[in-house]
Amino acid sequence: MSASLSAVSKMDTADVEVLARLRDSVASVFHGTPELIDHLLVAVLAGGHVLIEDVPGVGKSTLAQALATALGCSFTRLQFTADLLPSDIIGVNVYDNSKGEFQFHPGPVFCNVLLADEINRTPPKTQSSLLEAMNEAQVSVDGRLHPLPQPFLVLATQNPFESHGTFPLPESQVDRFLVRLQIGYPELENERLLLREAGREVPAAEQILDPESVVALQKRAMAVSLHPTIEDFILAILRATRTTPGLALGASPRAGQALVAASRARAFLASRDFVAPDDVLAVVEPVLAHRLLPAPSPESGARGSRSSVAILREILAGIPVPR
């Protein structure tokens, strides 16, 4: 590998300090693993959305609120239910008698950080109302476009173990999430802290940035250089997912773009101005696994018993890592 990839480059010290303070601010409220917080910050820096699949009560709402506060961004929590309508999310035009015209009343999607809680409990029509917002950072109501505030992050949650009264997200919507994360149960000492905080007022996260600063940080993160050798590595991964017999659906071109953006964000978070192979390997699973669909089992006709994560790890094991 060329010297440009192996040499250590340094970012602006101010950015390094800000990112460290962001980590500390979120960690002061959310007692999870540093790796999880880093994956969340990768999504923020890459301008992507996050799908959290986990059981109730592990701190998903706390994490979203802490992140929004640390970023200095507006926050809305929306509980998705079976009777939720698209207009309940994006807004509606209401006739104003005094002005003799329709006025647009924005819905809760008009914020910087939207917690879409239990997103799979609402019907597909309502789920799909988020597609334009997530992909284009705008919504269309009665033929008029309304841009969303920037930055805009959807943090959606769903319980993977409960299927009664739920509507699985279509593949097109799952593909809009940059990363899929699992929080998991807390480690022993973190759970001890949670027990001690029970019934007490927990201090809020410290505000580190504001929306304009977040957007500027995102632009600098996406300016991180990507060597052609790393491009070849990413292309090899993408193409392997499309030819592996165990997968019915491989990674889309959008998935490739997401992997590049996440790799750049991870490098920026690691205080480097170039993407290293370790950056790709650190984010490839949360970026790609939820976009892959295991092939049906020949015996039962159902989806294969092997998970997309296991298949992806097998693919990665067979691809040489640039050094």
Image (cartoon, rainbow, N blue to C red):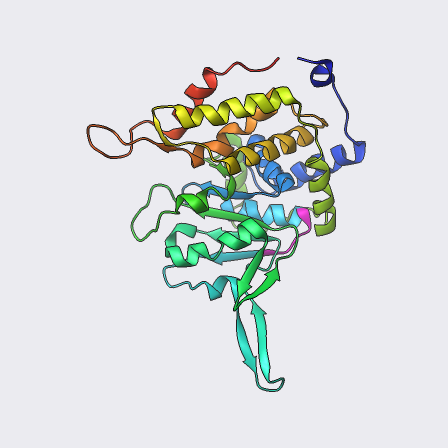
Q: In the depicted view, which residue is nearer to us: 148 or 44?
A: 148
Based on the picture, tell me whether residue 50 belongs to the magenta stretch: no
Quarter of the rendering occupied by the N terminus: top right
Residue 130 visible: yes
Residue 223 in the figure: left or right of residue 314: right
Residue 214 in the figure: left or right of residue 320: right
Compared with residue 117, is residue 254 higher up or lower down, i.e. above or below? above
Compared with residue 63, is residue 282 higher up or lower down, i.e. above or below? above
Q: Position of residue 53 (x, y in %)?
A: 43, 41
Please provide the residue range marked out in magenta: 71-75
Based on the picture, tell me whether residue 73 belongs to the magenta stretch: yes
Residue 11 in the figure: left or right of residue 178: right
Q: Quadrant of residue 123?
A: bottom left
Q: In the depicted view, which residue is nearer to us: 17 or 132?
A: 132
Count of numbered tags: 0
Q: Position of residue 277 (x, y in %)?
A: 60, 20
Q: Quadrant of residue 4?
A: top right
Q: Quadrant of residue 281?
A: top right
Q: In the depicted view, which residue is nearer to us: 20 or 39?
A: 39
Magenta stretch, main secondary structure class: loop
Q: In the depicted view, which residue is nearer to us: 80 or 301?
A: 301
Q: Position of residue 306 (x, y in %)?
A: 33, 27
Residue 294 in the figure: left or right of residue 319: left
Q: Residue furthest left?
A: 299
Quarter of the rendering occupied by the C terminus: top right
Instruction: Please tell me which residue is depicted at 66% across the width and 26% down the height of the picture.
Output: 226
Q: Position of residue 66 (x, y in %)?
A: 60, 47
Instruction: Please tell me which residue is depicted at 42% across the width and 19% down the height of the picture.
Output: 314
Q: Residue furthest bottom?
A: 98
Residue 36 visible: no
Instruction: Please tell me which residue is depicted at 54% across the width and 67% down the height of the picture.
Output: 143
